Amino acid sequence: MSTASLDRSTPRSADAVNAPFPHVPQDDHIFLLGRPPIAEFLGFMRSAGIDGSNSADTATLTGEWRSARAHFENLEITEAGYADGPKTKPLPPELDPLAQRVLEDEAIQSSLGLVPTEFAMVELDRVVISQKYINLAHVDKLRRSLPAQPDVRTIGEFTLALSSIDTPIQIVQGSQTIFSFASPSRELRFLDSYLLEPSKLSIRKPNGYPVAFVCLGVGFGCDLLMVMEINGRLILQNGSHRAYCLRQLGVSHAPCVVQKVSNREEYELVANLEVKQYADRYLKSPRPPVLKDYFDPMLIKIVPMRRRQRMVRLQIGVEISDVPPSA
């Protein structure tokens, strides 16, 4: 197992030590320097600061980015091919029931059925990452749920979790057609729309005799540690904080869902938005960003950010008109 870790006692940047407005709830985040373009980094710093102070010294920030960029360019030479051909291990037999539980869960069958899927022990350090920052407060919460030296069964329960259903959520109905949902979890999302027959629902009957109900689903995505296998690389699709947490504990391999993508059409269907937009960065670079970069002091910056909630707002539009009958 790897023993490298970034402890919360690691000296932080001046921004983190002298964070503005201490009465405002804040969480420290690790931002990955060097790989994202400098304009993207500066934009992040402007939006991250509570009063804009994170971007006050632009010269210092650009200097930090240049140093990290130079280090990353060196890694592209000295570690060229590092992300290529990572070896996976079979899932230990004691984790087979967990894998079967995932396969049988109706909530994720549709997404896992898009491409061939298998379960494997994946080497965390060599997994390609697209998420540029990690919320250390969330990592701390996850870490408190684990023992200092988790066994393989505990790790399996941690990486093959099915939902965040215990995460707090606030629901507000603003009017008859506007609904707002808020949660500290970034997994909160609009799930799907469903057309149901009245017989499928046991609810109070509205004024009239319904012939159909339109249901809009809001909830949480799965907590599975999931990677996409393509062109000999494993790209992290879901579970960045869990992967970071395990790596921080010294865990080198973790049970993971592996989506095996064999062509461009499947890639467009499965890949997350960041990976689709910047495909060359993750698929063609000789040394793309990988999970172990979060633990390289030359590639990271600790940034205090105002604590935020994920908000999902649904507004229903109703239009009634008289039109000619269809042929």
Image (tube, rainbow, N blue to C red):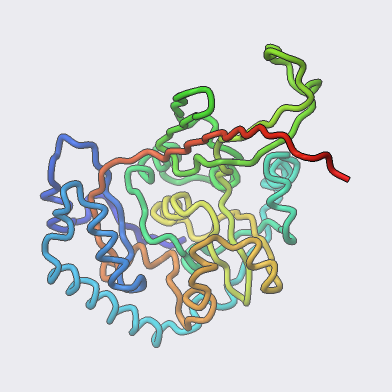
Quarter where residue 227 is shown: bottom right
Where is residue 75 drawn, in percent x and y? Answer: 37, 81
Q: Nearer the viewer, residue 95 or 109?
A: 109
Residue 32 sits above or below residue 199 on the image: below
Left or right: 308 with respect to 92?
Answer: left
- Which residue appears at 62% of the width and 34% of the height? 319
Quarter where residue 87 is shown: bottom right
Where is residue 177 drawn, in percent x and y? Answer: 53, 28
Report the quarter where the C terminus lies: top right
Left or right: 185 with respect to 15?
Answer: right
Residue 11 sits above or below residue 183 on the image: below
Give the residue at the far right of this rendering. Answer: 327
Left or right: 68 with respect to 84?
Answer: left
How many numbered discs sit on the rendered protein?
0
Quarter where residue 148 is shown: top left
- Which residue appears at 71% of the width and 40% of the height? 101
Residue 115 sits above or below residue 24 on the image: below
Where is residue 269 drawn, in percent x and y? Answer: 66, 62
Q: Nearer the viewer, residue 15 or 172?
A: 172
Where is residue 216 drawn, in percent x and y? Answer: 62, 34
- Which residue appears at 59% of the width and 55% of the height? 226
Q: Nearer the viewer, residue 165 or 11?
A: 165
- Which residue appears at 75% of the width and 41% of the height? 104
